[in-house]
């Protein structure tokens, strides 16, 4: 049970950090002390993409030389950050496009890819089914991020930096293409004992599906540095979204960037622990609810100077809502197109 009290600034945050470390040194294991939340929204700085000048595209080249026609320009804006824990009723995927849930993991080593794919992917299927009501969930990728890194894309077996830029991982056109490309790389069904055919993948694409991410800290201490913020999509206008291209040698991925507005309503969950998961949509084919949840890492104003680094894992899934024969997807390793 969390107790809300007024946040008095960096000294209060430092006191809580010291208490957490004292518990760990005493051998009591990690127990989060009473959280100290902001009584009012905090003023923070968020990094928004700027629209490209005429003749240029918005995006970047990945694993190939830059051809000079892409620009990646962002600008800092002041924004208000709300406490997601204070929402009553709590946010859900249907109401706001994101939700926080308590879901401890049995994983011993999140850097062991084999263990993650065998144990954690199965846990994430259950998480997403509960949060979304999906009948089937396919987990296709994960990335570990550390606040001390500077690289946005992780090499095999490595980690990447948090992404301090407002973005959504998919576009209205890019998400269906990504599903079909994953099908070409191989989506295996244990029930049928083979990869799904292109026709079967087309059937999946013709029905409702959603790309849903799950974000978790994997440190023993709560998140202080570079927490993840999510935006209530109801506060975003359609014409504020614009394209960001990730140009690989063999394909082009598409994100959405977002034009700044003072009307955007941002939330984060202070001091998120490793037993909590933040689940959020990055695409939903259904157009009658939240579809594109913009998100970003940001600097919390009250973060103590000696706070530990953020170490997190994000898992990417596809949720299917209709009865089709995809009940036993195995987990395969795909490269991510996300920044």
Image (cartoon, rainbow, N blue to C red):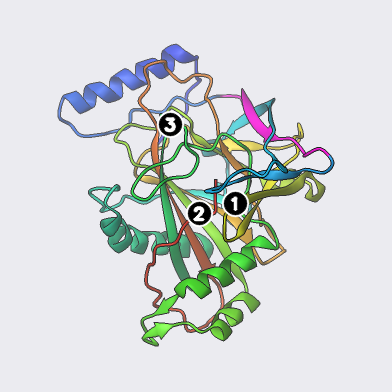
Say which element carries label 2: strand
Say which element carries label 3: loop
Say which element carries label 1: loop
**Residue 334, percent from left and from top:** 44, 61
User: Which of labels 1 and 2 is toward the front?
Assistant: 1
Lower sequence index among marks 1 and 2? 1
Which quadrant of the view contains residue 306?
top left
The residue stretch that appears in magenta = 39-53
The residue beneath circle 2 is 213
Q: Quarter holding the N terminus?
A: top left
State how far apart marks 3 and 2 are (Cα): 19 Å
Residue 63 appears in view: yes
In this view, the residue in front, 38 or 262, is: 262
Q: Residue furthest right?
A: 54
User: Which of labels 3 and 2 is toward the front?
Assistant: 3
The residue beneath circle 3 is 147
**Residue 37, percent from left and from top:** 49, 26
Q: Residue furthest left?
A: 27
Residue 96 appears in view: no
Examine the rendered structure and indicate whether residue 267 appears above or below residue 320. above
At x 34% / y 44%, what residue is drawn?
Answer: 275
The residue beneath circle 1 is 169
């Amino acid at each position: 049970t969390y107790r809300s009290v007024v946040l008095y600034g960096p000294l209060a945050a430092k006191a809580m950090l010291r208490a957490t470390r004292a518990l760990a040194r005493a051998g009591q294991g990690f127990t989060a002390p009473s959280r100290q939340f902001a009584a009012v929204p905090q003023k923070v700085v968020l990094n928004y993409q700027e629209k490209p000048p005429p003749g240029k595209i918005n995006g970047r080249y990945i694993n190939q030389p830059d051809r000079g026609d892409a620009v990646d320009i962002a600008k800092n804006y002041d924004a208000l950050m709300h406490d997601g824990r204070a929402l009553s009723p709590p946010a859900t995927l249907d109401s706001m496009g994101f939700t926080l849930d308590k879901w401890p993991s049995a994983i011993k080593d999140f850097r062991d890819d084999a263990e993650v794919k065998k144990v954690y992917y199965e846990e994430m299927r259950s998480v997403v089914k509960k949060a979304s009501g999906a009948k089937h969930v396919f987990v296709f990728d994960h990335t570990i991020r550390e606040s001390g890194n500077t690289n946005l894309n992780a090499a095999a077996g490595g980690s990447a930096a948090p992404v301090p830029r407002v973005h959504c991982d998919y576009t209205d056109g890019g998400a269906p293409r990504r599903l079909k490309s994953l099908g070409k790389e191989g989506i295996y069904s244990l029930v049928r004992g083979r990869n799904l055919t292109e026709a079967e993948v087309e059937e999946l694409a013709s029905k409702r599906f959603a790309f849903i991410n799950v974000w978790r800290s994997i440190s023993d201490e709560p998140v202080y540095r570079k927490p993840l913020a999510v935006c209530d999509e109801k506060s975003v206008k359609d014409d504020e979204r614009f394209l960001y291209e990730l140009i690989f040698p063999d394909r082009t991925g598409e994100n959405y960037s977002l034009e700044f507005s003072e009307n955007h309503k941002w939330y984060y969950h202070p001091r998120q622990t490793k037993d909590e998961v933040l689940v959020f949509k990055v695409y939903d084919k259904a157009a009658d609810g939240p579809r594109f949840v913009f998100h970003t890492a940001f600097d919390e104003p009250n973060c103590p100077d000696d706070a530990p680094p953020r170490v997190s894992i994000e898992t990417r899934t596809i949720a299917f809502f209709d009865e089709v024969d995809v009940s036993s997807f195995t987990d395969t390793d795909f490269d991510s197109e996300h920044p």
